[in-house]
Image (spheres, rainbow, N blue to C red):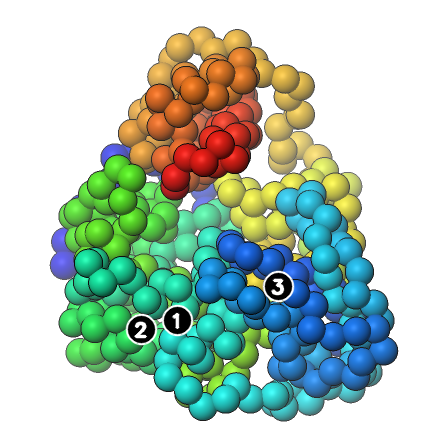
Amino acid sequence: MSPRRFRGGIHPPDHKEKTRGGSSARIGVPERIVLPMVQHLGTPCVPAVEAGDVVERGQVVGRAEAMVSAPIHSPVAGTVIAVTETLTATGARVPAVEIAPEAEQDWDRFVPLEDAEVVHTVRAAGIVGLGGAAFPSAVKLTPPQDMPVSTVILNGCECEPYLTCDHRTMLERPGRVVAGGRIIAEAVGASRTVIGIEANKFDAVDTMRSAAGGSAEVCVLPAHYPQGAEKQLIRSVLGIEVPHGKLPAATGALVHNVSTAAAIADAVEDRRPLMERVMTVTGHVARPGNYLVPIGTLVSDVLAAAGGTVGEVARVIVGGPMTGMPLAGLDVPVVKATGGIVVFAQGEVAPAVLGDQPCIRCARCVAACPMWLEPYVIGIHANRRDWDATERYHAIDCIECGCCSYVCPTSRPLVQLIRRAKHMLMERGSKL
């Protein structure tokens, strides 16, 4: 299969060498678990426990009461300390369940999911997109009837610099990735499954080809950011553009992250809910690597498990440097969509820019934008709070990949400006 090239994009250094070679390791039992009731796109969960309750590993502690939602399970056996609020990586305060884990945990034990059909099982397991989108996976498994799915694409690109958790998943759990792809394809009636992997992961390409046999195709894609973005991946694999204002399902394609596929296989074959995930911890830490982390572990505890930070820390980012969130403090929990924690030292991050900077009309952001937008124009209008103008320039189509900010010679905070415009437009009722 010959990949097609999408328009725009950039080629930042990948900085993956510190973590792609070592096996994933489980961290120890954290002192406390904090489970935000908002870990997905959609309706927040409702706490299903009270302070003083003894919970088992795998027990539902956050109940989903809407279709676009996903329940939350305790990743440990322990006692509920409080039903409270917590600060998240986005800066929002949300309801949360705080649990004191037992000192000894049997990681092989959990409350199994009830035996049910695939979509119900995936919903009950609380699975969301683990590549960062956090959209409830069960909803994606029920596409509109007028948009039949012919091709399932498993996203193994992991184009975000520094992160290697998907890479390790493909190397360490290839059978589960393939099984998840098969389950997804059967659920939506797709006749074809393609695994897209960037060309900087040839060990994963070989491993996945061996595991897939003839059940799935492996498509080797250029290392080109943001290759793993859903619309760009569909373009690269199938040569089809997702029409403006349409869902990716309009192309007959359904995209799931490889780690999401493995979690779906765990749920369907082992009745295991989503309680933990592999995430990359890298940068200026003593032991960079990939770690299997209970969801709800505080960032400070994850960093401690990696040996702590090294040197003078300038910034800690949850996620990757292109799309992640810089933290104001470390006492925030990791959630289902947390793919990594990156620690930067002084000299590795640009100085903070106060306010908007003059645009020199170089159009580098236009050339880099994979969505064919004019980021500089949207940024100008967003800075003026002219939301009607940002809508005319299709701000809502921005995928927040960060390419525009990366190439801007005057360091304009374009992503932040466009994100603000999108928020205002969605509040006014504009559709994604």
Pick whichever of labels 1 and 2 is earlier in the sequence.
Answer: 2
The three-letter code of the residue at mark 3 reads Cys
Spot occupied by residue 392 in the image (x, y as percentages of width and height): 35, 21
Q: Residues within 10 Å of mark 2 (few under 14, many from 20)?
A: many
Name the residue that disc number 3 marks. Answer: 45
Secondary structure found at label 3: loop
Q: Nearer the viewer, residue 288 or 280?
A: 280
Comparing marks 3 and 2, which lies closer to the viewer? 3
Q: Image quadrant for the C terminus?
A: top left
> What residue is shown at x 77% (from left), y 56% (from top)?
85
Spot occupied by residue 275 in the image (x, y as percentages of width and height): 60, 74
- Tell me whether circle 1 and circle 2 mark residues in contact (CB < 8 Å): yes
Name the residue that disc number 1 marks. Answer: 261
Answer with left or right where residue 429 lies relative to residue 368: right
Secondary structure found at label 2: helix
Name the residue that disc number 2 marks. Answer: 184
The three-letter code of the residue at mark 1 reads Ala
Pick whichever of labels 3 and 2 is earlier in the sequence.
Answer: 3
Alpha carbon distance from label 3 to label 2 = 25 Å
Spot occupied by residue 323 in the image (x, y as percentages of width and height): 51, 43
Comparing marks 1 and 2, which lies closer to the viewer? 2
353 to 362, vertically: above or below: below
